[in-house]
Image (cartoon, grey):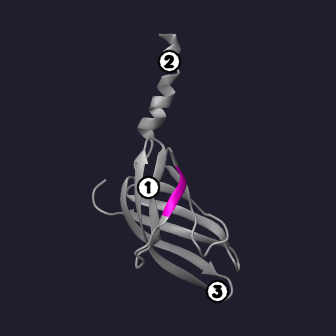
Amino acid sequence: MKKWLWLTPCLALVLNAADISGKWVGNIDVSDPSSGTSINTPVRAEFSQQANTVSGTIGRREDDQKEAIRNGKVEGKTVSFEVSAPEVMSAMKFVLTLKDNRLEGEMKGALDTGEIAGKVLLTRVGNP
């Protein structure tokens, strides 16, 4: 019996993990230091979660083509993943926190013009 006790904390972590499966819409706000303004991009995402692994797609709302998520994982209420796209120099890294039916956090990466960072806010579409 004692040899199975180590499963208790693992089971608690799985049961407390966020479930982000489903469709999400929102915005990514990126500051433009050259103009002092913020660029707001409407986005949509679709996530599929199995245990603590996340897959899916994310992209601009008006685009038909979405980019695939890589290295997606959930740890408690924190969701992290990477996205590569033709216009970026390296993978864009997302770190988001689930708060009710919202995912909030940051996106960081690099374009040919330099490093970029943005604030991300996504809201779940429909019921979880």
- Residues in magenta? 68-72
User: Residue 102's image quarter?
Assistant: bottom left
Task: Answer with left or right where residue 39 lies relative to residue 127.
Answer: right
Q: Position of residue 35 (x, y in %)?
A: 65, 89
Instruction: Check disc 1 and report its element: helix, strand or loop.
Output: strand
The residue depicted at 51 percent of the width and 11 percent of the height is 2
Q: Which mark is residue 36?
A: 3
Magenta segment main secondary structure: strand
User: Residue 112's image quarter?
Assistant: bottom right
Q: Position of residue 111 (x, y in %)?
A: 66, 75
**Mark 3 Cα-neighbour bin, 10 Å: few <14, some 14–19, many ≥20:** few
**How far, Cα to Cα, is label 2 from label 3?**
56 Å
The label nearer to you, 2 versus 3, is 2
Q: Position of residue 61 (x, y in %)?
A: 41, 75
The residue depicted at 42 percent of the width and 77 percent of the height is 63
Q: Amino acid at mark 1?
A: Lys
Q: Residue furthest bottom?
A: 35
The residue depicted at 63 percent of the width and 72 percent of the height is 88
Q: Amino acid at mark 2?
A: Leu
Q: Is residue 3 above or below residue 123?
A: above
Q: Is residue 119 above or below residue 10?
A: below
Instruction: Check disc 3 and report its element: helix, strand or loop.
Output: loop
**Mark 1 Cα-neighbour bin, 10 Å: few <14, some 14–19, many ≥20:** few
The label nearer to you, 2 versus 1, is 2
Task: Mark 2 or mark 1: name the one nearer the start of the chain.
Answer: 2
Task: Mark 2 or mark 3: name the one nearer the start of the chain.
Answer: 2
Report which residue position mark 2 lands on: 5
Report which residue position mark 1 lands on: 99
**How far, Cα to Cα, is label 2 from label 1?**
31 Å
